[in-house]
Amino acid sequence: MLRIITANLNGIRSAARKGFLAWLEAQAADVVCVQELKAQATDLSDEMRSPGALRGHFVHAEKAGYSGVGLYLGRPAEQIVEGLGHLEFDPEGRYVQADLGNLSVISLYLPSGSSSEERQQAKFRFMDDFLPHMADLRAAGREVVICGDWNIAHREADLKNWKSNQKNSGFLPEERAWLSRVFDELGYVDVYRRLHPDTTDACYTWWSNRGQAWAKNVGWRLDYQIATPGFAAAARQAAVYKDERFSDHAPLTIDYDWSF
């Protein structure tokens, strides 16, 4: 069995103080994808770099206290790919890939457009460039799983207040249509939805810090594991962990019947 966890940490130092690394060591995960490190390499403790038997590989944003992604691996990778070769987005630390046997595991932090129209347009530019990259990954013939914060709720079942959010970043028609293309045109599979096609409230992975969103479970499903069909078919169970709060996001764990 192969266990993969994805978690937006909203600051690795903050998440560590809230018990994330201690929790992680008890999960027996093989791969952990983390996003929004909000830290530079010099900010990381030894435990943050290598919790338990896992070894970390990180891509930091050039801007201090911003973005950044990482992968914790329980076995050495044949190759680590840092960034997409994109001059606009690579400095933001949004992509890291590990090739493990015939499987590529990617930690992705897709831009948010909620802060301004300028950032929304940047998000659209990233999406425009990332779609052909996903097509190239499929064409290479490897199994692929892209884990992370996609900053898009795909369906009405993926957020509590979908009616009032149809004009807001994260649930715009253009964003949802783009994610549909990932599934319908490129053939990728939303692994959580493969296992839980009709789940609503239990699927949320992010809650606003405003109001009482967490207490009332007014959430969004923004964190996904999206895979090629062969790997997605190996998924056996998926769960969102909400017993503790390490971040404004919750970790998503999926177990796959897979060996190298």
Image: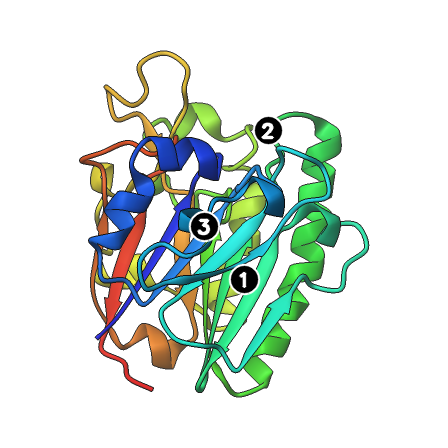
Q: Nearer the viewer, mark 2 or mark 1?
A: 2
The spot of residue 7 in percent (x, y) is 39, 47
**Which residue is found at the position 67% from the left and 69% from the top?**
132
Disc 1: CA contacts within 10 A as few (<14), some (14-19) or many (>=20): some
Give how far across and how far down residue 134 sits, in percent: 59, 69
The first of marks 3 and 1 along the sequence is 3
* Quadrant in which the N terminus is drawn: bottom left
Picture layout, residue 94 above or below residue 8: below
Q: Which mark is residue 46?
A: 3
Mark 3 or 1, which is nearer the eye?
A: 3
Disc 1: which residue: 181
The foreground one among 33 and 230 is: 33
Answer yes or no: is residue 150 visible: yes
Residue 68 lies, in percent from the top left, at 59, 46
Residue behind mark 2 = 114
Amino acid at the residue labelled 2: Ser
Residue 40, horizontal then vertical, whole percent? 62, 42
Residue at the image point whose x is 32% and y is 41% from the top: 20
